[in-house]
Amino acid sequence: MVQGKWFEPGQPLEDAVLPVRRSVFGRERDSLDDESWNACVYLDGRPVAAGRIWWKEDAFWLGDIGVLEECRNQRLGDLVLRLLLFKAQSHAAREVRLFSPPDTVGFFSRLGLEAVSPAGTDPIEMAVAGSAIDLDTCKSCRKTNCPNRR
């Protein structure tokens, strides 16, 4: 069973978010945890994916979106990203931004984020206007009979 859970700023992350962050990024708790909402996705009761969102300089920022290696390709990262974008959308976000390694730009662009930094930069800054967040459809969906396709 797949479940999502939110952790509000300052809430303990040791049993959920941090094991994912440690495994994927090699990092522990940091100063952003005191101002970030963290989303964690559980697979059969085990934390396997996580990400966070915070407010800075007139935009919502996403970061540390990762999935344990052995659990990838099950759309769990997509679920984390959608949870984070929903949080931004529900708070009337004007803009959502993130920094992406070049090899994950395609993943983020499926839900409307576009590169805003000059070509060849690493990491690549990406953004989407709050009004352009669309959680009902995936822009790279290969299904021709999808009821969400417009």
Image: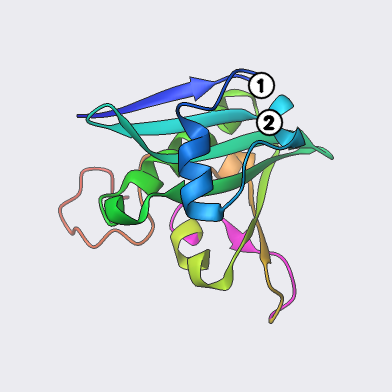
User: Marks 1 and 2: CB-CB under 8 Å?
Assistant: yes
On residue 33, the disc is 2
x and y, in percent, of residue 3 in the image: 31, 27
x and y, in percent, of residue 109 in the image: 50, 60
- For the point 67% across and 29% down, the residue is 36
x and y, in percent, of residue 12 in the image: 58, 20
Range of residues picked out in magenta: 109-119
User: What secondary structure is the magenta-colored segment mainly?
Assistant: loop
Query: Quarter-wise, where is residue 131 in the image?
Result: top right
Give neighbour class at mark 1: few <14, some 14-19, many 20+ (Cα, 10 Å). some
User: Residue at the left extreme?
Assistant: 145
- For the point 52% across and 66% down, the residue is 105
Helix, strand or loop status at disc 2? helix
x and y, in percent, of residue 128 in the image: 62, 50
The quarter of the image holding the N terminus is top left
Q: Amino acid at mark 1?
A: Pro
